[in-house]
Image (cartoon, helix red, strand yellow):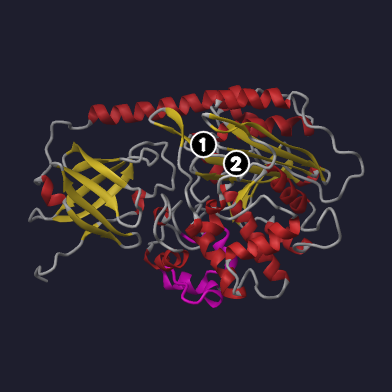
Amino acid sequence: MLRLPLPRRFSRILVAFPVAVFLTWSMSAQTAPAPAPPSDLDAYVATAMTTFEVPGLSLAIVKDGKIVLAKGYGIRKLGDSTPVDEHTLFGIGSNTKAFTTAALATLVDAGKLSWDDPAYQRLPGFVMYDPYVSHEMTVRDLVSHRGGMSMGEGDLLFWPQSTYTRDEIVYRLRFMKPAYSFRSHFAYDNLLYLTAGQVIPAVTGTSWDEYIRQNIFLPLGMADSNTSVTAFKPGVNYASPHSRVDGKLQVIPLETLDNVGPAAAINSSAVDMAKWLQLQLNHGKFTDRDGRLFSERQSREMWAPQTLLPVRNLAPSLASLKTNFSAYSLGWFLRDYHGKKVISHTGGVAGFVSRVIMIPDENLGAVVLTNAEAGEAYDSILYHILDPYLGLPLTNWTATLRQLKDEDEKDAAETMKKAEISRAADSKASLPLDKYAGVYKDAWYGPITIRMENGGLVISFDHTPGMIGDLQPWQHDTFKAHWRRRTIEDAFITFSLKPDDSIESARMEAVSPLADFSFDYQDLLLKPEEKKGSAH
């Protein structure tokens, strides 16, 4: 999900524990013509886009094996009137994960791999923190979010854009202490999906990117899609990412996610994603010709529950989304919605969020791609599409989700205001500022430098060029890292001292309760680098 930038409470639940924007589709083809989408869909989309400040989006609906709609709305970029169409490319974020599991499924079909192969046997040098986990972790475990890591642990290795390579990130797994016992707990992670993707070149000699292109994009005719924003050259039909920066929606730079490609790097269009939905709903069989991309057996395997998720209580206004079960399969979330099994996933990268949903019992699938970080927009649109197909009464999902968003933002603002009021603003740091300067190291991230600049402290993450921030005094030995690049979530950093007033360590945490979990500050433990010539 790579990063899954859905900062509101409702959206974050949907990312890690999708609540109900999930469709179910039938196992057998229907002969009746595919029903048309809701007659008011265009007007509804326009309202949702205005309500949640989405410059452009593209959507597709597949029913009974046919593409009944693939259409663009709005503009590709604020300040530019070029419209979005059905071929406009958007970052699909963690919807990439299902492409990675499908690629692995083709290798299982070919007898080159088994889901239950130990990862270390397929990926030489693979090591986790716990030797037992290193030995027992299977390919299936890599793609089931049950490896024992905390949610988003290690995401700072690639997010914001870092200099680490895929192999270097996989190597650093060995330094990440588990948060849970192996296979005992669901915690959404990106690094193990990256690791699963690296199994592909280890087995085939072909990079993940090229394998996806040759074995999924080309056979399906996904002519628009690619695996890197480096393909976004002048003249290419792509949407620009947008984010709220200091309260205002703005165009932001594209993030290169090549070093975490198998977890989040695909860019696609409504037309191409419709073809992907057709294949999924047809259990790996092509809809326009004989042949398969993966077997029906592997289709069932990828939709089978692997890791159970808790069934959570929802706000009263979301009572109709109550679910009876929740699980993660191989690249997909599983839920039920009004008695129908739903297969779904969200995706988010900087400036883009998306959702794919399918209802097998109805042979129905839909996708919404957006160029803003507003999960409420795609949720409201998808529910509006879903409910008529299921014969459910219409709900004004846009108004419902707008209200929840406002409540979450109000709660977060109050939390931050209380923290501001209650802090000991007049307190002083224990040491002169220059004593906090130096190189610190975290076991898995590596070096982080704090230096003096213009009389103040500046922090920088050595392998993340964009992470440079001013350390503003907060209280006592706690500072607030105010990043110069304002799309990065601010963080507190608190120093612990030894009895001799030297620095023992430093911990970090996000300032905002709405910060995306991929800003994984809380898993860092910064230790001062021992200065050359110091006594041992």
Q: Amino acid at mark 1?
A: Glu
Residue 134 magenta:
yes
Magenta stretch bounds: 119-148
Query: Which residue is disc 1 drawn over?
Result: 373
Query: Which residue is disc 2 drawn over?
Result: 354
Q: Residue at x 45, y 52 (%)?
A: 152
Position of residue 291 measured from the top left corner of the image (x, y, whole percent): 83, 63
Instruction: Determine whether the residue tagged by mark 2 lies in a helix, strand or loop.
Output: strand
Q: Residue at x 68, y 24 (%)?
A: 44
Q: Residue at x 40, y 68 (%)?
A: 174
Question: Going by the picture, which residue comes out furthest to the right?
Answer: 31
- 178 sits to left or right of 79: left
Instruction: Determine whether the residue tagged by mark 1 lies in a helix, strand or loop.
Output: loop
Position of residue 472 measured from the top left corner of the image (x, y, whole percent): 21, 38
Q: Earlier in the sequence, mark 1 or mark 2?
A: 2
Q: Amino acid at mark 2?
A: Ser
